[in-house]
C-alpha cells in the first residue's frame, strides 16, 4: 500500500503568491498514493485563511493563537499532521519542473537510513554528495545523492526550502526553535542537523536534484518589518 503524504503549505499573508504556488503544485506533483493538503498560517490578517479554504476546500489548516514566527507555526502544524510523510513548502516557492514525490517516498520506504529528501535544488551549496541507490524492489531501484554532513563545508545540509520528510526526521532532531527570526530559525535547526550525525537519519537529493526546481516569487521578509523574533549569528563551525 502506498503511504499517505501531506503537503504542508507554510504561509503568512501572501494572498496572490500562495494561489499561484498551490495551482502549480497541483500541476507538477506526481504521487499515485493518498495526497492530503494542510495550511499552516501564522495569524494572517483579515479573512486570509477563510478565503484560501473557500478556493481550496481540500485543505485542512492550523492557525497560531497569535503571530508567533516560523517555528511555532510549523511545529503546530506538524503536531496535527498524522501521515507518515510530509512535503513542506513555503507560500512563495513556485515549482518549475515535475516533482516526483513517489520517488522520494520509495527511497525512504526502502532505505530506512534516509529521513529527508530535498527537492529545492542544492546548486551553490558547499556539500559533499555520495552517489547511492536503494535496494532492488520488484525489479526497480531509485538512485540518489546522500549528503555527507561530516565532510560538507556549508551549513545547509538541511534547508527550509521544499523538502519531503518522514516523521522519524523530527522524532530524532526535534522541532524548530521558537522566538527567532526567519533566517535564525532556519540556521539554528540546520546547525543542529549538521552536527548530530545520528545513524539512520540521512538527508539526500534525488539524481536530478542539484539544479534549482523552484522560483522564489515573493519579496523576502527576512530582516524586514514583518520578520518577527530575535536575530542571532549562527556559526557553522
Image (spheres, helix red, strand yellow):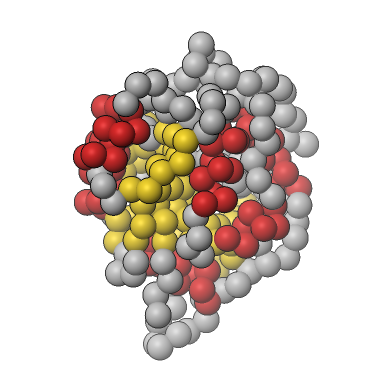
Which residue of the protein is positioned furthest toward the top in this rendering? 225
Task: Locate residue 138, reporting x and y percent.
Answer: 40, 88
* Residue 23 in view in this figure: yes
Toward the viewer: 169 or 156?
A: 169
Task: Locate residue 87, reporting x and y percent.
Answer: 44, 53
* Residue 154 in view in this figure: no
Quadrant holding the C terminus:
top right
| 173 over 185 or under it: above or below | below
Toward the viewer: 217 or 211?
A: 217
| 91 over 111 or under it: above or below | above
- Residue occupying the point 59% across, 65% down: 114
- Residue occupying the point 61% across, 46% down: 157
Task: Locate residue 201, reporting x and y percent.
Answer: 66, 62
Question: In the image, 198: left or right of 40?
Answer: right
Question: In the image, 17: left or right of 8?
Answer: left
Q: Exactly how many numbered labels are in the figure?
A: 0
Residue 56 occupies quadrant? top left
- Residue occupying the point 26% across, 27% down: 16
Amino acid at each position: 500500500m502506498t503511504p499517505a503524504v501531506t503537503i504542508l503549505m507554510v504561509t503568512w499573508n501572501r494572498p496572490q503568491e500562495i494561489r499561484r504556488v498551490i495551482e502549480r503544485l497541483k500541476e507538477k506533483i506526481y504521487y499515485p498514493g493518498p495526497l492530503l493538503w494542510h495550511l499552516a498560517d501564522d495569524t494572517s490578517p483579515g479573512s486570509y485563511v477563510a478565503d484560501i479554504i473557500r478556493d481550496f476546500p481540500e485543505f485542512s489548516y492550523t492557525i497560531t493563537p497569535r503571530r508567533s514566527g516560523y517555528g511555532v507555526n510549523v511545529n503546530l502544524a506538524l503536531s496535527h499532521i498524522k501521515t507518515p510523510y510530509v512535503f513542506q513548502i513555503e507560500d512563495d516557492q513556485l515549482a518549475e519542473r515535475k516533482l516526483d514525490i513517489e520517488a522520494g517516498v520509495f527511497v525512504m520506504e526502502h532505505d530506512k537510513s534516509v529521513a529527508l529528501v530535498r527537492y529545492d535544488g542544492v546548486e551553490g551549496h558547499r556539500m559533499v554528495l555520495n552517489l547511492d541507490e536503494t535496494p532492488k524492489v520488484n525489479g526497480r531501484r531509485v538512485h540518489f545523492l546522500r549528503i555527507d554532513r561530516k565532510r560538507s563545508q556549508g551549513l545547509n545540509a538541511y534547508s527550509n526550502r521544499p523538502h519531503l520528510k518522514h516523521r522519524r526526521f523530527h522524532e530524532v532532531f526535534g522541532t524548530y526553535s521558537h522566538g527567532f527570526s526567519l533566517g535564525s530559525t532556519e540556521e539554528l535547526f540546520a546547525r543542529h542537523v549538521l552536527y548530530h550525525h545520528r545513524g539512520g537519519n540521512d538527508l539526500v537529493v534525488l539524481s536530478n536534484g542539484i539544479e534549482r526546481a523552484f522560483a522564489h516569487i515573493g519579496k523576502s521578509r527576512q530582516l524586514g518589518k514583518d520578520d518577527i523574533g530575535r536575530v542571532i549569528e549562527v556559526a557553522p563551525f
